[in-house]
Every structure is written in C-alpha cells, then in structure tokens.
Amino acid sequence: MITQPQTIPAPDPYEERLRVQTARLLAYRDDGPLVTLLRDKVGPGLPPVPASLAALLAIIAMAVTGMLVNGPMLLVPVLVMIVLVLPTAARDHLGKLDWLTPPLIRAAEFLTIILIGLAADAPKWLLYVLIYVIGYHTYDTVYRTRQSIWPAPWVFQAGLGWELRLLLVGAGAALGVLTWVLAALTLYLGVLFAVESVTSWVGLDKQTANAAQASDDLETSPEEAQEQATGEADQT
Amino acid sequence: MPRVVLLGSSPGPDAAPGQATPAALTLPALPGCPTVIGKLHGQLASLDPQPVTIVRSGDAAAHRGFPGSLVETSDLAGDLRAVADAVEGATENLLFLPTNSLIHDELIYQITKSKRGALALITKEPREEDENGDVIVPDVPIDEALPEIGDRRLEGLPVRVRARKSRVISVGSAFHGVTRPNSVLLGPLHLHHKHAPVLAEAARELADMAHLLGPDDDLVQLLVLGLVRKGVSVGIRGRRDLFFRRVSSPEQAAEALAEMSTFNEDKARLNNAVKGADGFFTTYFVSTYSRFIARWAARRGLTPNQVTLISIALGVAAALCFATGERAGMVAGGVLIYFAFVFDCVDGQVARYARKFGVLGAWLDATFDRFKEYVVFAGLAVGAAVSGVGDVWTLALIALGVQSIKHLLDFSYGAANRRKPPSPLPSVALSVSADTGLRQALEQRKNATTSGIRSLLKMWGRAGRYRAVHWARKMIVFPIGERFAAIAIVSALFDARITFLTLIIWGGIGAAYSLTGRLMRSLA
C-alpha cells in the first residue's frame, strides 16, 4: 500500500487573521481573575455590546439622578457592571459591532471610578493618576499585540482586570477608606505595569536588535494604515 | 531581505540585434567606469548576496564574474520557465529588475519596503490634450471600447497596461488585448513570497503559449500579466522624485546618467522619511521644516531614541511651565509643547531617514506621546489651582478619559477591521485573448457590494477629492497635531478651564464623527 506523506496543512491565512485579531479584541477588554474564574459558569452569557452599553447607560442614569451619594450606595454601579458585563466574557466577540465592547467597558470603568471618587471626595489628582495607569496598561497591550508580542497571561491576572479594580474601589468607598484604597491600588498597578512593561520591551529590543522589523507605525489610525497599504482611501 | 532576480533577456526595447549586450555598457562618467550590470550588482549586494540572473546564451558572457547564479536560456519560453524555477518555493520576497537598469538606491529601498503584496514601477502616458490644454475625452465610452493590442510606445516599451488609481487593472501582450491601455511597466517589480507559487504557475502557462507572444513583449510585463489574470492585486507607483531608466545604447547610457545626476537622491530620501497622510496642522506647520531638523540630527549622529528623549524633556518642561499658572508660564508652556510635538515628529523621521528602526524606539515614541499629553493636562490642572482659576481636575479627568477611550475606539475598530473576509479579485484564463471578461467581473464586483449604506460611504469617499473636505475631515477627528496645537494656543491665550473644554468638546465631536462612519462601515 502506498501512503501519502503526511503534511500538516498550513493554517488558512484568513482563519489565522480572524483568530489573532479576535484575540486582540479580547485582550483589550482586560478581563481579570474573577472573570476568568466565572467565564465558564455563566451559561450562554450576554451579548457584549448591548450589555456593556446598558451598564454604561445605567451608571450615567444613576449619576444624573443623583443616586450616587457617599456610602454603601457607591457599590451599586460596580455591581451593575459585574452583573451586566461579566457574563459577556462567555461570548466569542465575532459580531459585526463587537469591536465596541472594549471601549465601552473601559469607558464604563473610567466613569465609575471618577463618579465614585468624586462622590466620596477622594483627591482628584489621585484619581487622575489611577486612570492614567490603567490607560497605560491598555495602550501597552495595544502596542504589544500590534507588534505580535503578547503580554504574558499573568499580567492580566496581576493587573486585577476591570472587575476586581472596580470592586476594590467600590468596597473602599462603601467602607469609607477610598483614599487609602486608591493610593494602594495606584501604587501597586503603577509599579506592576511600569516594571513589567519596561523589562519586557527592553528584553525584546535586545533579542531583535539585528532583525529589527519594527517599521510598523504604532500610531496610525485604521483608515490611515489602509490608505498607506493600499494607496486608496475609504474604498471599502 | 528579498531574493533578487535579474532579467537580462527582456525583449522589447532591449532587443537591438547586432548590438552589444545592454547590461555590458560602460558608464565612463562614474568612478571606476563600471558596466551597467556591475553597478547594479554593487547596489544589490547588501539586499541579496546571491541574486539569480536569467539571460539569453548570447548575452551570458557580459553577466559572468558576478556573485549569484546565472541561468542561460535560448528563447522566451526558456526565460519564463527559468523565472518559474527561480521563484518556486521562495520564502523571501522577490525583487525583479532588468539587468540594464539605471536606478537610485533609494528607489530600490522604497520599492522593497512597500506594504503591498505586489508593486510594479510604472509610468503613465500623458493624457491627450487639445490645443486649449483640455483633456480630450474619447468618443467611445470605456464600457464600449474594445480590447486592443497596444502599439503606441513610451520609453521604448509598448503601451499595453491599463492602470487605475492604485493598481494594475489589465495587462496585454502581442496576444492579449487590453481595453484602453494607458501605462507601461518600467521593469522593477516587488512581490510578497505568498504570491510566488501563483507567479511560477502563470510563468509556466505563458511559457507553453510563448509562440503566441511577440518580440515586443517585455518579460516583466508578461509576469505582471500572469499575476493580474490570476487575481493578484498588483499595486503601482511612479518614479516620483527618483530616477529609473533602462538603457540599450551607449548614447542612451550617457544621456540617462547625465539626467540621473540632476536628481537629488538625499532629498528624495528625506522626503520619504516624512510620514504621509498626516493631519492639517502637522502637514502645514510641522512637516514643512521638521525634515531639516531630522537630517541635521541624523548627521550629528543622534539616534531616534535620543530625539524622543529631547521631546519628552520638552513635554515635561511644558507641563512645569503650565503648572506655574502665570501668564508668562502659560505662554512658555505653549511654545514648549509645540516644540515637544515637533521633536516627536522628528524622531520617526530620523528613524526612517537613518533607517534605524527598533522595537524599543517604536514603543518609546508611542508610549511617551501619551505621557507628554497627559502630564501637560496635569500641569494645567495644577496651574489652575495655583493661580486661582479654580479646581479644574474634574475637567482634566474627563479630558483624559475622553482621549483614552477615543484611542481605544481606534484600536478596537482597527483590530476588527483586519478580520474582514477577503474579497478576491476576479481572474481570467491566460488562454483568453480579450480582457473584457476581467472588466465585466470587476464591474460586477463593484456593483455587487452597492447597498444603501455603501453608496453613501462611497459618495463620502469621493467628496474627499475636494481639498477643503479632505482637510476638514482630517481635522474633525482631532489628530495629535491639532490636539497639541489646541493646547498650546488656547492655554497661551486663555486659561486651563477653556483648554480642557476645547479638548473635551472637539474630542467628543471627533469621536462621534468617526464612530458614525465606523458603525456604518461595520454594518455595510
């Protein structure tokens, strides 16, 4: 009997692109340990965009109606986020509009932190630094995945994810120790993200010092990148 | 590093019976009096130390004694098969060049750095004009025009290519007709290795039908014909501010060399280092002169990362000035933040001009752009508190949040946009002479995707031809140049509160605008 030599079929380029880009979207969500733990236990989950949009609107509504007063009430927007957004992690994010999920989650997270901080009268500069630090982590994830250098999974766990960060801030406010919680959280995340990011980028730079292929611009908007690559703007 | 394939047996303009091999022409005006092929080998040594040269046996002598391998052929079919053999199984990208090319190093560099899967150097026929200088519109509309075997000539090559704005639509030969040919393929062709098997297959098919092809058909033209007929998108670029010519006689060589020396290659390199598609402010108030700082820095031996550090220092200094809250400090801060932005543009230009790219440099640049911007926000907020404008930290928080989310919208849409299913170009068998089928299939492809939203988007895209619309659209999304300019000007003239309000309102409008377009594009 003649047997054909077995070859491993190369992955279809389109399938591969779909997989990588979806993984990037999921990384931008910045889910933490709690989401990882509960992801498989929420059944079919919730559709990502409607659920996170609902959470964002609910938090805005609470702020506008003046419901967010100092005290245990400040834990409510956090719980709204957990209840509505956590189950969306079970979904595959392949929908046409699912790219809206990461910005919606991050917007809701930032808004919640700001609202809780203002209601509990925490130092605003401290809120500013905390949001910058979380934002730094998001930017760093984007820049790394654009260069196909994925941050290690433990970074997302150690970064606590949006859900644990919000729970800590909410609990701190409910217990009246928000400033201390903000200070500790900012210091911890700042050191973690800065040290991890700098060491891995420097290490990577040394590895690729000779094979530098980093001409890919980290800054370009999607439309610009398309314009440069195809020479035609807005053709899709 | 690409695999270089040198084509010595291109027929067409190079076939001058009885004359010496064009590639063996000497260039007495250059130091060392090299031959054309010798100069080319010198230019390519750093790209590919082992190029493949494909020549007719009669011309082989002139191509001996250089690095790489030499394939001798006896006819056009042999040339095409040799190309197929040379590219089959290539794991590097491919660069094709005629052996009688006179070309700038910078042009080779720019072509090989292209992000297109396939890129050919072309030149378009000048449009026909009447005595008043108006473009003559042909009587027969293009949809009714018949494919033709082009017989006009441009730079010695038959005009047998139809190119549109960004890619080659159709290529002809002595056998293959083209509807309304308007360009010639000059010779250089760069190809991503994923297209190598397609090229090899097409070259073999063409080799089997070589008896139908004519003495005018250039080898590169035939290769592109094969690619286009097989549905590969072949991008085009002109020579722009660089020189390329094929020479076939001593007079041509002398003439071409004289013309080449009138080009400023360094200037072209510097211009190419400036990123295209920038915003209005960057284009008109920074890019007009930043390249000269970049060249100065590169010549002084400054690395891109050192320039980035200068920019960071200027940004921090600006934040400190803003933090004083006094009018003089605000003005100084505005000036400093402007120069922080200028140096931010310069670092990328130094990297591209000096060709020093690094992973760390790209990261430093991107990360500290954010840092500079947000540290200036903090400086403004401190300044407002110190000078008694009031507590604007809440506004600073909102400005920070709006800008971060706007960026994340960009990034997320970018990731999702890259996973759209490919929309393949039509293909037509090489045994068919007319390109009518290709044209019709392209028309169908265009019309098949015309839904309500799409036609709206298309109209919007066309509106970009008007300069005012083009720049208004670029400004409304509030790109980095406009942001830094807004901070500088508004802070210098007014106070931190008004600066933040400007940032939040403009940023919000920009986010709403780009979100609308992207939602439509996602649903279309």
Image (cartoon, coloured by chain):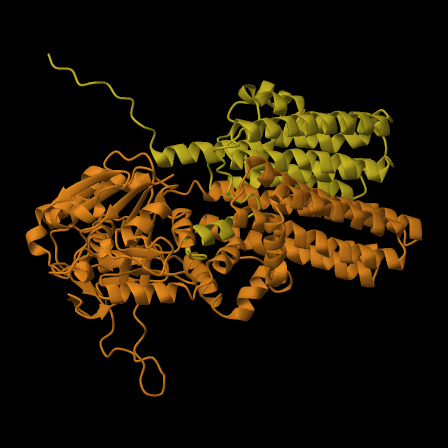
Chain colours: A yellow, B orange
Q: Residue at x 28, y 53 (%)?
A: B35
Q: Residue at x 58, y 40 (%)?
A: B362
Q: Residue at x 77, y 36 (%)?
A: A129
| Quarter of the figure with residue B255 | bottom left
Give above or below for B272 relative to A56: below
Direction from residue B185 to residue B397 in the image, left or right: right
| Residue B392 visible to the viewer | no
In this view, the residue in front, A117 or A63, is A117
Q: Position of residue A229 (x, y in %)?
A: 43, 50
Give above or below for A111 relative to A167: below
Direction from residue B420 to residue A149 in the image, left or right: right
Residue projecting furthest to the bottom:
B131
Q: Position of residue B106 (x, y in %)?
A: 43, 53
| Residue B510 visible to the viewer | yes
Q: Position of residue A75 (x, y in %)?
A: 77, 29
Q: Position of residue A202 (x, y in %)?
A: 61, 29
Give above or below for A154 relative to B249: above
| Quarter of the figure with residue B103 | bottom left
Residue projecting furthest to the top:
A1
- Quarter of the N terminus of chain A within the rendering: top left
Give above or below for A46 relative to B434: above
